[in-house]
Image: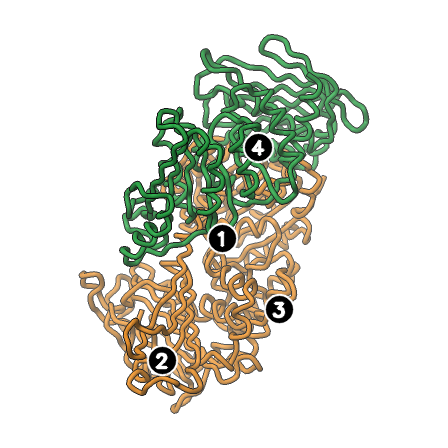
Chain colours: A green, B orange
Amino acid sequence: MTENASVVAIAEPSRVQVSQIDKQLKTIWSAQEGATRASTFNLLVYESELQDPNSIGEAIGAIAVQHPCRAIALLASTDGPKDNLEAYVAAYCPVSEGGGRESICCEYITLRASGKALDELDTTAAALLLPELETFLWWKGPLNTHLELFTNLQHIVDRTVVDSSLFETPEKALESYTSLALGNEKSRSFGDLNWSRLTPWREETAVAFDSEGRAACLGALDRVIIEYGQSEGIPLNPCQAYLFLGWLASRLGWQPLSLHNKDLTKQIIMRDSTQRPIQVTLRAVAGEAHLAGQITSVGLRSEEMGAACSTVLCSSDSSSCIRMQMNVGEATLSLVSDIDTLTTEQLLSEALRTPDRDPIYEESLEVIHDLMQLK
Amino acid sequence: MTASLTGGLSANPLRQGLRLERTPKPAILTIFGASGDLTVRKLIPALYDLARDRRLPPEFTVVGYARRPYSHEEFREILKEGVAKYSRSKLGNLWESFSKGIYYFQGDLDNLQNFKDLGEFLQTLDSERGTLGNRAFYMATAPSFFAPIIENLGGAGLAGDVRNTRLVIEKPFGHDLESAQNLNKVVQQVFHEKQVYRIDHYLGKETVQNILVFRFANSIWEPLWNNRYVDHVQITVAETVGVENRGPYYDEAGGALRDMIQNHLMQLLALTAMEPPSAFEADTVRDEKVKVLRATQVGQGPNGLAAVRAQYANGWISGEPVPAYRDEPRVNPDVKTASYIAAKFTINNWRWNGVPFFLRTGKRLAKRVSEIALQFREVPHLLFPSSSAGQLNPNMLVLRIQPDEGISLRFEAKRPVADIAMRSVNMDFHYGGTFEVASPEAYERLLLDFLLGDQTLFTRADEVEAAWKIVTPLIERWEIQKASDLNYYDAGSWGPSAASKLMDNGRRWRRL
């Protein structure tokens, strides 16, 4: 993504009748010279108005810089008249770093609804989707898989993206989410921004075991410690730690055997395909608010005699760095990597890259699903 | 323990599903000529960016080899400044650990004992860095050193084999067909062709690679991509810069003919004209490029070869006066080196018979632009009133390489008036505006491919020789027979008027 990219509104949001949305968009585009109306997908964004009302516009603007799309914001109104629906339309063009306007622009529709109109918003949204394009739903906020709008939207979208760092009751929500994602029709997929946040951790862990000598260590690992941030006043959220463990376990063929909660620590026993036990600790550690719920260190070790396996990945000294230390035969190498703290828009962009199911993610969810059954 | 540079990553199950699948095995990259500009400006910044993107293993090690007496630390400091200035990413925490893997070795390029000592040093590093005996050598030196380096690598027992040792040779590869053949012989006495990577940074550019994707991943073009529909092809690589301080090098390198036409433009011609390969693999792609190059020759004009050469006179560019070629620093005022070449080429095969390929390149031209333009034939029968016929423009497909990478298609459309009035419309695709990820530098792509053992974007021995063979008649005419047909053009113009005479049958150079 171009770091300094931004968008310019070629038409500021204006309120229109729902039935007039298409006509209004045509009016906007016909007044533009040199602006090309292009779309690569439909993006539905759900947000409760309890959240910052400007945040959707900013996020969609940032997405528009990267992907021309028709974005439809679905806002749950909490203070408007009952059973009410309001619509707004706008259009944006990306602006390049040099200040010149790019020619490909996108359009943005806001539907603000309350009461029954909110529950039935999927039908209005469906009529506004551009045909023959994939449709993504970004469910921005706490997840309730039983909410009528959420359920209804599943019939018109190809991919649903959530953020498990925002789950209000993380383990309960994670359990119902894994059931939904794994039990879903093959034609639809799910994604999680919290999974995208793990990408640098997964890459760094993979790099640590690339060389032939180190790859052999994977079979000897028997101790895993994953630490994640906890901050006063912010509910404990171990979802990211679970996702990392689910990924590691699924890649290495580990199965969960038991799960015990003790204060801020979860002790998990897993076993590998040879029935060898692996001891896993998920531990919350006090830290700054912006690291709440985020992994701060991963330790991978082996108690086996002579195994050159001791890998520590940490970000405890800085939120933007991962330090990897590992033994390679007689040599000990350490590598400090810069990790960009990805913005929500960058994470979303990653999640919108494809509507296809991610088998690695789903296999990770399967482990988490099995783990949740052990509580 | 010796491990091959390629393969084996599938053994790491943690790699599955990650986009970073292409990571080479641990290796030591030795750069000959490491105190030069290329290392500081291009190679190390590209390697740093690759490391930052986790494309290099933690064991990856660089050894700079040159004559100057640097300590490891002094060398690292020089490179650090280069990374800070030229890298895509900012100098960050990674530099500390990345630079620990950089070493300096002082030695002469023509001293065998120095190479033997280098071999011992590399062995020591193997145990310290875990690089398992894997070696890569990069010749970033003047071409005159290529042969001695290769011979010394062989003499010191450092040539290894296809599993653990690779060699990169920077351009120019030879200065004519005979010297290229001689250099190939030297290379092949020491290395297997599978170990050799002749680099042309042009092929690392995203948009050059996109020519292959555009042609072979879209079925709509293939039926049109032949002499039935294409009238002619124009390939332009225009620069606004002059030779500046590089005059002596540019003269020695042979000016626009050898520096640009023989390699960059011939590569663009080959990618445009080649037949579809059966697979996207190094040798199948290169086989097709060689075939089309072997079928290519300089076209004939009324007075012999259809080619024009010229040198820039003084002029104005972007509102600034610029000197003539002969007035540039360190340039001999009597020199006849051509800074501009335009030529017609023909490809004698079923697909392209009768379709001229017009190539032009020059320094100090009006605009910096590189593109391939395919002009399509006119419609066989014009339906519309003759008043419109005069305005009818042929369809044009343009693959833009720089600076505004993309593709545009020109077609005719009816203007919204009562009469049939037509207007040409350009439909544009902008590479940068559509894909959000900044393109990696060409050297990043090529260094990674080289470390991974992917030769697709590197030039094979027979391909280099075929390209030299094409331009040999021009070398003979201008440099051996010393033909006195050097033209001049004003800096800031589009080249000499003589170039327009190459265009026959009402064709004309595109106004860019």
When the figure is inspected, residue B359 is found, relative to residue A321, above or below; the finding is: below
Q: The numbered mark 2 sits on a residue in which chain? A: B
Residue visible at 33% across and 70% down?
A: B339
Q: Nearer the viewer, mark 4 or mark 3?
A: 4
Q: Residues within 10 Å of mark 1 (few under 14, many from 20)?
A: few
Q: Nearer the viewer, mark 2 or mark 1?
A: 1
Report the residue marked by disc 1: A131
Q: Residues within 10 Å of mark 3 (few under 14, many from 20)?
A: some
When the figure is inspected, residue B266 is found, relative to residue A7, above or below; the finding is: below
Number of the label disc, if any, that sits on residue A204: 4
- Which of the 4 image quadrants contains residue A233? top left
Amino acid, disc 3: Asp
Q: CA distance from mark 2 to mark 4?
A: 55 Å
Amino acid, disc 2: Val
Is the C terminus of chain A in the top left, top right, bottom left or bottom right quadrant?
A: top right
Closer to the camera in the image, B359 or B106: B359
Is the N terminus of chain A in the top left, top right, bottom left or bottom right quadrant?
A: top left
What secondary structure is marked by label 4? helix
Report the residue marked by disc 2: B308
Amino acid, disc 1: Pro
Q: The numbered mark 3 sits on a residue in which chain? A: B
Report the residue marked by disc 3: B287
Question: In the displayed image of the protein, which residue is found farthest to the right?
Answer: A274
- Which of the 4 image quadrants contains residue B182? bottom right
Q: Is residue B245 left or right of residue B103?
A: left
What secondary structure is marked by label 1? loop
Q: CA distance from mark 4 to mark 3?
A: 38 Å
Q: Residues within 10 Å of mark 2 (few under 14, many from 20)?
A: many
